[in-house]
Amino acid sequence: MKIGVSMPATVPGSTAASLLEWARRADAGPFSTLSVIDRLTFQSYEALVMLSAAAAVTKRIRLMTSVLVAPLRDAGLFAKQAATLDQVSGGRLSLGFGVGRREADYRLVSASYHDRGKRFDGQLALMRKIWAGEEVDGVGAIGPKPTQPGGPEVLIGGSSNAVPRRVAEWGDGYIYGSGADPAAARKVYNAVEAAWKGAGRQGKVRFVAGIYCGIGGDADERATAYVRSYYGHSPVAEAMAKAVHTTPERIKDSMKAFADVGLDELLLWPCVPEIEMFDRLAELV
């Protein structure tokens, strides 16, 4: 099982300089992937812009959104941006996608919240068409052509009944981001795997998950406070706060538990911004 790490781009106190230092250290260190979480209605950095900046200061590490709320964006423009970033990074881009649960985000971009799943399906189909170099609506192809054949790797998150179908039809894998429950993650993955095989897809469907982390000093208190703030009034806020990993032992236990259910890659999502947190996480890999 590979281990990735996230830039704390949604954590209060992060700066552009510190986030780029995270990227440099991740590229030089033991991690397989550098990810970033997406959020609109929060004091946070925009995900794709941060990955573009990270691409400029890294050479090896894979770059991933974990996850990005696709229906907030225009599919054609985003497909072009993603293809550009895939070119700039030398084919290192992975896109974790979801539909999001915050209606306020949709109001701020004048997008419909209630049909977001249907629009997401259309976006996935259109992006795959664009990345394949096909003509769109008779107006020609949209470039540049991604470095990765067929476009960046697409991982689809969520737990709705539509997730297995979406992965089987348009994705390369499943990303679990609903807390630290390997058994629950495996249950959804089993459904994804069945849909994948039922659709006649070949090879192994990718299996990725993430856990929130905050260890050392007062990091445990700050981490749980951040997660409560991040999820706000959502019904899952308290459950997510309880799922924060505040000791090295708990992180190691989760690494083993996720490895035992067949996870391909575990992402460590830091909940405090200081670079010392990076060093503590790196020591566990």
Image (cartoon, rainbow, N blue to C red):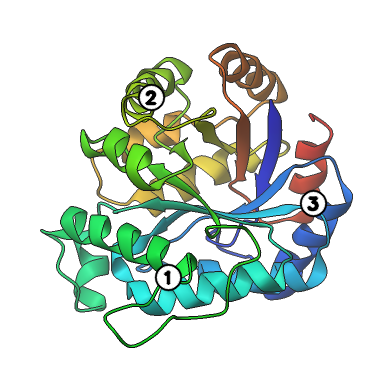
Amino acid identity at mark 2? Lys
Give the position of the C terminus as an image quadrant: top right
Local secondary structure at mark 3: helix
State whether residue 230 appears in this view.
yes
Q: Residue 185: where, in percent of width, then height?
A: 42, 24
The disc placed on residue 247 is none
Dot 2 alpha-carbon crowd within 10 angstroms: few under 14, some 14 to 19, many 20 or more: some
Residue in the image at 37% along x and 48% along y: 170
Q: Earlier in the sequence, mark 3 or mark 1?
A: 3
Which residue is identified by label 3?
26
Locate residue 230 relative to residue 114 in the image: left or right: right
For this rendering, which residue is in front, 120 or 245? 120
The disc placed on residue 130 is 1
| Relative to 14, residue 207 above or below | above
Whether tag 2 and tag 3 are in contact, CB under 8 A, the answer is: no
Give the position of the N terminus as an image quadrant: top right
Local secondary structure at mark 1: helix
Q: Residue 183: where, in percent of width, then height?
A: 42, 15
Locate residue 176 relative to residue 153 in the image: left or right: left
Task: Report, in whole angstroms, how far the alpha carbon at label 2 lies from the one at label 3.
Answer: 35 Å
Q: Earlier in the sequence, mark 2 or mark 3?
A: 3
Amino acid identity at mark 1? Ile
Amino acid identity at mark 3? Ala
Which residue is identified by label 2?
197
